[in-house]
């Protein structure tokens, strides 16, 4: 077999604030021969997620930080192009932690990579990095297991047009809730209401978020699914109901701070309203992913569930593409296409 050349983005330095070009090292190395039990995966698509910014920081978290000079961690989809393992055959499409590189090689049973087969005939591949992948599972289990929505309740979700937010809102609607999104820009808000079926969406970039919450949540907020943190979280806490549930999924407004993370100033509202705030880490639900995938795939087939992906083409565009998340430039789930499927 002709020796393949593997291009990779490695972490060169811990970012301060927004990641910059000097924080990355673009390298190239030949793909080694396979040993028994190993597979070679050609990267097709990579998932770009806000959590990646946290993985670059030193310190204790739910997952170890990416080490300096290590290939940047990223989930993705790839095609098995060589195999010495009975677990996967050449041609299989797999999902797992491929990393920001052209190829992945290693043991088929590697738990860190966590590869599993996906069916390219059941849905377009990018959907497996959106509602049928980690963002979708985060939304599904975060809302249903942590948020515990009941029919008739009001659910508010920030980052409503993003990968997690668009799924949260649609799952909540399927469960009989009133859903109000928060997003940045008229186009995103129109999409959330007209395409995804939210009851309302507040454009935090235009007008008063406080007034918007008062108008669209006249009976208060029962469940808030938070993807952004900061000032938006503070404002929502002023509108929560008795026994409200706050799901902490992310805080994209805080990830690139050069000062300490801003905590909720209105946290005493949790006390007054006997409310609960709880975090969601998707890996805790790995043994139940198939349940979420099955229900949302059924809704997709019925035409009652939609997704939107924002796809950037080219591995070399990774640094710029990642920044789109923090500049609000992506519209839908941000995906990097590395090769044609």
Image (cartoon, grey):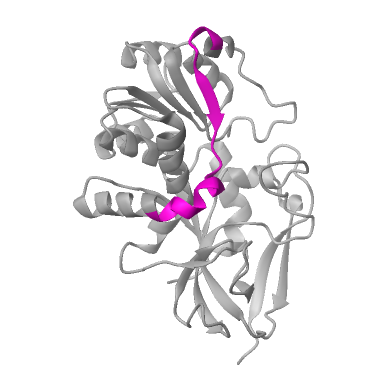
Looking at the image, is 111 positioned above or below residue 52? below
Residue 221: percent from left, percent from top: 39, 17
List the single residue furthest toward the bottom: 1
> What residue do we see at 44% from left, 41% from top?
141
List the single residue furthest toward the front: 287
> What residue do we see at 62% from left, 81% from top?
37
In this rendering, the count of numbered labels is: 0
Specify the quadrant that holds the C terminus: bottom left
Looking at the image, is 320 positioned above or below residue 279? below
Give, as a single range, the part of the protein colored magenta.
271-290
List the single residue furthest toward the left: 302
Is 196 in the magenta?
no
Position of residue 261 in the picture relative to residue 333 (left or right)? right
Residue 217: percent from left, percent from top: 34, 15
User: In this orientation, which residue lies closer to the viewer: 136 or 48?
Assistant: 136
- Residue 99 can be seen, yes or no: yes
Looking at the image, is 310 positioned above or below residue 185? below
Specify the quadrant that holds the N terminus: bottom right
User: In this orientation, which residue lies closer to the viewer: 187 or 181?
Assistant: 181
- Residue 208 can be seen, yes or no: no
Position of residue 195 in the picture relative to residue 326 (left or right)? left
Residue 104: percent from left, percent from top: 61, 72
> What residue do we see at 37% from left, 11% from top?
214
Is 277 in the magenta?
yes
Residue 122: percent from left, percent from top: 31, 64
Q: Quadrant of residue 176?
A: top left
Position of residue 149 in the picture relative to residue 75 (left or right)? left
């Amino acid at each position: 077999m002709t020796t393949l050349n593997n291009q990779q983005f490695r972490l060169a330095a811990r970012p301060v604030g927004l990641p910059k070009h000097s924080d990355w090292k673009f390298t190239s190395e030949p793909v080694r021969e396979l040993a028994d039990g190993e597979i070679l995966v050609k990267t097709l698509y990579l998932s770009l997620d806000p959590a990646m910014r946290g993985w670059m920081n030193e310190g204790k978290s739910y997952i170890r930080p990416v080490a300096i000079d290590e290939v940047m961690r990223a989930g993705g989809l790839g095609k098995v192009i060589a195999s010495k393992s009975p677990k996967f055959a050449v041609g299989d499409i797999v999902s797992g932690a491929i990393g920001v590189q052209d190829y992945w090689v290693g043991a088929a049973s590697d738990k860190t990579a966590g590869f599993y087969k996906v069916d390219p005939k059941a849905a377009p591949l990018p959907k497996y990095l959106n509602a049928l992948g980690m963002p979708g599972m985060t939304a599904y289990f975060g809302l249903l297991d942590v948020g515990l929505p009941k029919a008739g309740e009001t659910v508010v979700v920030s980052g409503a047009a993003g990968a997690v937010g668009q799924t949260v809102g649609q799952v909540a609607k399927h469960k009989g809730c009133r859903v109000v999104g928060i997003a940045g820009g008229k186009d995103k808000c129109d999409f959330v209401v007209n395409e995804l079926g939210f009851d309302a969406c507040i454009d935090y970039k235009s007008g008063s978020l406080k007034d918007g919450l008062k108008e669209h949540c006249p009976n208060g907020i029962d469940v808030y699914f938070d993807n952004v943190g900061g000032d938006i979280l503070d404002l929502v806490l002023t509108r929560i109901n008795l026994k409200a549930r706050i799901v902490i999924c992310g805080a994209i407004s805080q990830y690139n701070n050069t000062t300490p993370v801003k905590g909720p100033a209105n946290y005493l509202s949790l006390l007054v309203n006997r409310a609960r705030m709880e975090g969601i880490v998707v890996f805790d639900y790995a043994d139940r992913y198939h349940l979420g995938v099955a229900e949302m795939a059924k809704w997709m087939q019925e035409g009652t569930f939609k997704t939107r992906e924002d796809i950037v083409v080219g591995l070399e565009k990774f640094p710029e593409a990642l920044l789109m998340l923090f500049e609000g430039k992506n519209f839908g789930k941000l995906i990097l296409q590395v090769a044609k499927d």
